[in-house]
Amino acid sequence: MDLKLATLNRGSNELNINKRLIIYILSIIILWLGHSYTLSIPMETFRYVRQSLMSMICLVCFTGAFVLMKQKKGVRADKIFSFILMAAGVTNLGSLIRGLVAGYAGMVEYKYLSLPMLLYGSIYAYFFLLYPIEAFRPGWLTLKRSLLLLLPTLVIMAIYLIATSIFNVTSPIIDNWSTLMDELDNITVWLKLSILFYPLFGLVVMIRYRGNYREWCENNFASMENIDVKWLEHYIFSNMIITISCLVVVFSNDVRSVLMHNFIFLLFFLYAFYRVYFRRNPYPEGFFRVEGSWSKNGLEPMGPLSESITGEENDKLKRSIFMIRLPEYTARLEEWMENEKPYLRKDFKLTDAMEILPLNRSYLSRLFNEGYGESFYHFVMRYRLAESRQLLISRPELSITAVASMAGFSSASVFCRAFTQEMKCSPLQWREKELASFATARE
């Protein structure tokens, strides 16, 4: 049964990877087919369908924002996503009202490489970038950092205004690829194209942040079970689909191209609301507030520092003393791990080491990276795997599920995956081989 569990676990991982790849490829194909189809429908049908889609987007966005605000989880990321939903709802409602009054349902006119449309899409891309940053690293997104993320668009707009207002550079009317190629020597054309690439900049930030997020989690958590990395991957892919759709709209010079774009937004908001609403926050309350203090036990790791030295010198002194005391810290940590075995707790996390070490979270993370050359996650995993190997031999009557639980793993599947990766065989296979070797040695 345990061998079957390990085999099913490996097969499940491969199936999930293949399934995601197939879904991603199909999504891109459907996007292309959808845009091709909507560009051929009659204009009257387009207006009717678009008004229906925008009405549904308004309903989803306003309802989703209200539900998330009423949930009162106290998570700032949820508030940011509520704001995104509300902003999308307001803009779509404005488009519907404009359609009833002026006969044109849209906040901006969908013309080839239109500057208002580029700015409109750039602002949306900016808002979409804020949620994953805050959701996966609460507290990191300050007002200063938020403004820095918007800085590229602001700088481009400032240059555009200076060029057109002060230097009287004429912005040419571009309505097809041929005109675009002819006007490439005009600086305003390049500025428009630069704004167009802001959503791509957002994708690059998200993709890079994904890698940093996994690394950061491994430096702070002993288990990745409740860390929803897949949601970030789905969010990034959804933004990639939206970005590709935006490019089609910008370069199509046909208002009907926006219909598929609206449909994608509707699906995105439905799925995103579902994931945000049911997403569990992996961080305990106050987890990020311990950054500024040295530890909750009030101990100072370096002794009192002189008030006459500057902040930079203070930091250098702390780093220097930390490196000097690093062997002492590692020895105390290993003694605690051997005697108390805190890694057997399924919810064991980096900040729990503050019980015996006078260090804050940043220096604790450095302790593992510089003292052992590995992350906190891999450090704890070594102890849990060692404990599991001992249990597999000393308690042969235990099932793999029981061994996983007793060794501190969150589930049998997580244990089997980690053990197989480390030992190149399943726990059951390793146990049978070791017991056979032990029996042979006794004979």
Image (spheres, rainbow, N blue to C red):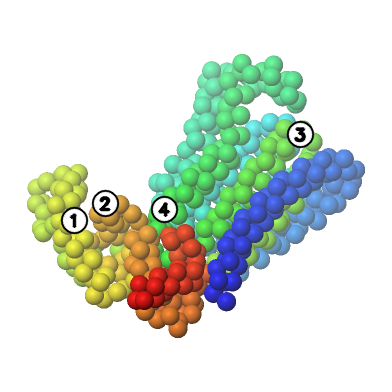
Dot 2 corresponds to which residue?
370
Mark 4 surroundings: few (<14), some (14-19) or many (≥20) residues within 10 A: few
- The residue identified by callout 3 is 252
Q: Are marks 1 and 3 in contact (CB under 8 Å)?
A: no
The kind of residue tagged 1 is Leu
Q: Nearer the viewer, residue 322 or 135?
A: 322
In primary-sequence order, the first of circles 1 and 3 is 3
Query: How dense is the environment of label 2, judged by Cα within 10 Å: few (below 14), some, or many (20 and up)?
Result: some
C-alpha distance separating marks 1 and 2: 9 Å
Kindly identify the residue that appears in the image at 73 percent across and 38 percent down.
249
Residue 215 is labelled as 4
Q: Are marks 1 and 2 in contact (CB under 8 Å)?
A: yes
Which residue is found at the position 67% from the left and 56% from the top?
19
Disc 1 on helix, strand or loop?
A: helix
What residue does disc 1 label? 326
Query: What is the CA distance from the residue labelled 1 to the residue labelled 3?
Result: 61 Å
Q: Amino acid at mark 2?
A: Glu
